[in-house]
Image: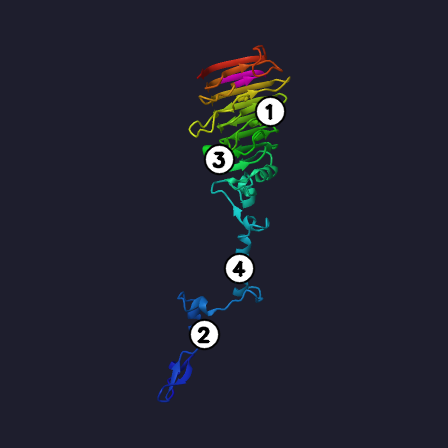
Amino acid sequence: MLPSAANRALKDLAFDAAGNPVATAGAGDADVLAAALISTTPATGGALVGFDQANTYPAGTVGLALKNAAVFNTDVSSIADVAKGAALVGYKLNAPGSVGRTLPDKLAERISVKDFGAVGDGVADDLAAITAAIAALGAGADLYFPPGVYKVSGTIVMNKQARMYGCGTLSVIQTSHATADVLQIVSFHNIVKDLTFETSVTRTGGYFVNVVNGSRCTLDGLIMTNWFNGIGLTGAGGAFYRILNCQIGTNVIGGIGGIGGIGGIGGIGINVGTTAVVDAAIQNCLIAGGVATQPLIGVQLLNVGDLTIDHVSTVWCQVGLHVAPVGATTSGPSSSRISFLTLAHLRASI
């Protein structure tokens, strides 16, 4: 006997073990299939739907959506194509009045030397990577040195209007060259801040930081160890220089030797030939030598106008403050082209 009409509705007709007709929920039951497709159990739901990335799916289908999602995942994770990766991501600051920007536009505000392949392990030569990073800087941009030891085999030339900074003692620029300047600044409106300079070889010449050309330059929070000459303003004049909060000393604990050695000018040298530096300040700085190997000079002034020296200490230097005339040697007479010199809280000791 057939099942009743109500029991047979939307069912398949099958037979039991005795051969009697029965109504069953077959695979073609739309209600059952719909319920299975929306299920969240592992064996149903999405497990009942097939997908092949190689297939072509019509517009508006789940297959096309899944295929586009797979392509997007590949594109957004790309680090080789500038049109992909971060370029596909937007950015908006969570604050009233902010506007949306692209993520690359936001990230371009600060360039890291590691963006150009700098390693910072104290072994790899990072000079080329740092040079490439400087070349990519826009006017007023920041160049960041994350914590690490950045070995350089020659001179870093800063020829952009920019701020160059790190994390103090954690961001180290280490030269492997005995005589080359480590950092030369040849542009205007520069700030170099919170970086440590050291050497892996015995230095016999050159500056750790040498402002060759430019005005409105600030050196702030720099730490220098085992230098021959520390900071130099050696260009043809200029104005508005600030040397602030710098520690120029030697690693006497490590026994590497003193600072500079015989012939080193010393900690800070303003030595610009016939055109004077105007409006300069050296404030809150320490220049410290070693007991056995003292630098010749803590601070040398050759040709400068309107200079303020305030809260500066020179320790274990043969000469704490040396004022010399144009063209004189570091041991020359005391007459000089110095005007409007203000000294306050200057301390020299041995």
Asked which quadrant contains residue 126, the reply is top right
**Magenta stretch?**
299-309
Among numbered discs 4 and 2, the one appearing first in the sequence? 2
**Is label 1 or label 3 in front?**
3
C-alpha span from label 1 to label 3 = 25 Å
Question: Which comes before the other along the chain, label 1 or label 4?
Answer: 4
Task: Count every numbered label the image shows and give the total.
Answer: 4
Q: Is residue 300 magenta?
A: yes
Q: Position of residue 114 (x, y in %)?
A: 53, 42
Q: Is label 1 in a helix, a strand or a loop?
A: loop
Q: CA distance from mark 1 to mark 4?
A: 53 Å
Residue type, mark 4 in image? Ala
**Label at residue 70:** 4
Q: Secondary structure at mark 4?
A: helix
What residue did someone put label 2 on? Answer: 30
Task: Look at 62% across and 23% down and name the residue there.
Answer: 235
The residue wearing badge 1 is 215
Q: Is residue 303 magenta?
A: yes
Query: Marks 3 and 2: in contact by CB < 8 Å?
Result: no
**Residue type of the residue flagged with mark 2:** Ala
Determine which quarter of the picture holds residue 275.
top right
Mark number, residue 171: 3
Horizontal and vertical percent for residue 174?
Answer: 52, 34
- Identify the residue at image location x=59%, y=50%: 81
Q: Quadrant of residue 190?
A: top right
